[in-house]
Amino acid sequence: MGMTMTQKILANHAGLDHVNAGQLIEADLDLVLGNDITTPPAVKEFAKTGINEVFDRNKVAIVPDHFTPNKDIKSAEQCKMIREFARDKGIVNYFEQGEPGMGIEHVILPENGLVVPGAAIIGADSHTCTYGALGAFATGVGSTDMACAMATGKTWFRIPEAISFVLKNSLRSPVSGKDLILHIIGMIGVDGALYKSMEFSGEGVASLTMDDRFTIANMAIEAGAKNGIFPVDERTLDYISEYATERYDAGDYKVYEADDDAVYERVIEIDLAEVKLTVAFPHLPENAKVVGTFDRVNIDQAVIGSCTNGRVSDMREAARILKGKRVAKGVRCIILPGSQRVYLQCLREGLLEIFVEAGAVVSAPTCGPCLGGHMGILASGEKCVSTTNRNFVGRMGHVDSEVYLASPVVAAASAINGYICAPDK
Amino acid sequence: MKAKGKVFKYGANVDTDVIIPARYLNQSDPQELAKHCMEDIDNTFVDRVSKGDMIVSGPNFGCGSSREHAPVAIKASGISCVIAPSFARIFFRNSINIGLPIMECAQAAEGIGDGHEVEADFDTGLITDLTTGESWQAQPFPDFIKKIIEKDGLLGYIADENVQGR
Ligand code: SF4
């Protein structure tokens, strides 16, 4: 019986020739990640293991990105604790605010060359699944798992079943990867892929940019999936040759392909040319509706950024719509480039100027409002169109506020018009 | 091992943001987290919950973020067991790791009413609604999970089994 791409990566990291869905394995890890919310409990648990050093100083990444720059004293204390831990353990990949490689964890790990095809990665953050875009196995865990993995370099997994998504044709601009993943979650539901892998394939994959793939893999967890994964093609290799140059040159990565007779629980074919601009209504990402098919929704705020849509192509798309326009009166438009690199690129390309002239606020790279942290919290009754990934009750502030998930072009067009709409170009 | 208490019943897809909103994640003390447990789905929970009580919900309980603070808050608020047809995978893993008993049983989750008195036997997997007398059979916990729960979580278990440093 053949294996899926995910199953092959896991088998290899467990030192096994073959694995079956449902099997429990112990796997070696290539990278263990934590942020300023999940690392503090992991540090406390790590101390209880009785082990003094992390398993590999190069294979732990700690990114204070959620409540940073520190929003209050408690957040500052949490960051201080993980900063001291990183220093004490000699953790190489600790990213401090403002450093050139800093930003939101899932934007910067690939940018800093820490993710290569074939790697096995866990992170104490649910959107760790983002790295499947590069053909790696990556999944979210909790703080205790992070602590044990930092100590031993291993963790246990249940080998997942898989759903295959076969993509054909290509997306019709301005439809993007965000619309595709919202469309998919709308189709299968927020537990449609529970415990499973979402494996993408088909000739349509080649037409998706790396940024589209990051956005799609990022939201696999929003369908309950363990991971989302893309095959490795020329675009993937171009990406790692640019961002993980040393490892690329050294051939320090591995390309896995699903077997022809791999077993999938379900095969879903999607014609990319048929996907439309899509918005997920409150309060679940599965409440997907095609733009233009619903009544007018006036908005108070638009947020463009996050680990889902904070990359440079997202910024370019938003700028394309906002150029020479003004954000509607009564609407706050908040733009958060996903990393210092993205920020610098926006600066060089003149995008920041476009944003500011349009009447948008440009923030430092941070998770900020995405999780209701800071930099754009909603009051009761307020509505926000956002390029983030979750629209749960109270996610961005007051329990009576509402978040509508959309792509950067829809968020930007909505900011200009004051209600959720498609761009006119 | 048995748990017994009154039930707080919720619907499908209870996410970790309503279990413990991010605005309280600037610290990780279990007792502090417990003060805000379930706040955005049921702001009377904290005042009404007492030790031993249970949560029964619809499918996909604990979906959303990886915050271990969610099962930690539930456990610290005194909840002895969560029963649902299915759990989100990171929540499932985190609950076991921190020693919060969870049971997957669709029939029980459907049959049990809000406020009912329920008993759950972790050794046999038997769940009994003492208010109606109905009972259901869930999977009993395998031995290693029972030990993790007894040791108050994975780390206590690892320390106890002396398997650290393997
Ligand atoms: S941007 Fe939002 S979803 Fe992404 S890591 Fe930050 S809080 Fe999580």
Image: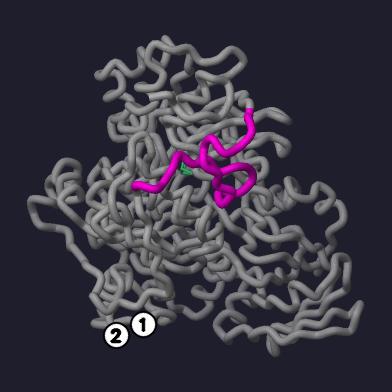
For this orientation, the residue located farthest to the bottom is: B124
> How many residues crowd around disc 1 within 10 Å: few (fewer than 14), some, or many (20 or more)?
some
Secondary structure category for the residue under label 2: loop
Residue type beneath disc 2: Met
For this orientation, the residue located farthest to the left is: A249
Q: Are marks 2 and 1 in contact (CB under 8 Å)?
A: yes
Earlier-in-chain disc, 2 versus 1? 2
Q: Nearer the viewer, residue A356 or A324?
A: A324
Q: Nearer the viewer, residue A75 or A355?
A: A355
Q: Chain of mark 2?
A: A
Residue type beneath disc 1: Asn
Residue A282 magenta-highlighted: yes
Query: Residue A121, how many percent across, how many down?
Result: 34, 59
Q: Is residue A174 above or below residue B43?
A: above
Q: Which quadrant does the N terminus of chain B fall into? A: bottom right
Where is mark 1, residue-wise?
Answer: A20
> How many residues crowd around disc 2 within 10 Å: few (fewer than 14), some, or many (20 or more)?
few
User: In the visual, does A405 lie left or right of B46?
Assistant: left
**In the image, what residue occupies the spot 30% across and 72% down?**
A4
Q: Which quadrant does the C terminus of chain B fall into? A: bottom left
Q: Main secondary structure of the magenta part?
A: loop
User: In the visual, does A305 lie left or right of A169?
Assistant: right
Q: Chain of mark 1?
A: A
Residue A57 visible (yes or no): no
Q: Which residues are magenta?
A: A273-297
**In the image, what residue occupies the spot 48% across and 48% down?**
A182
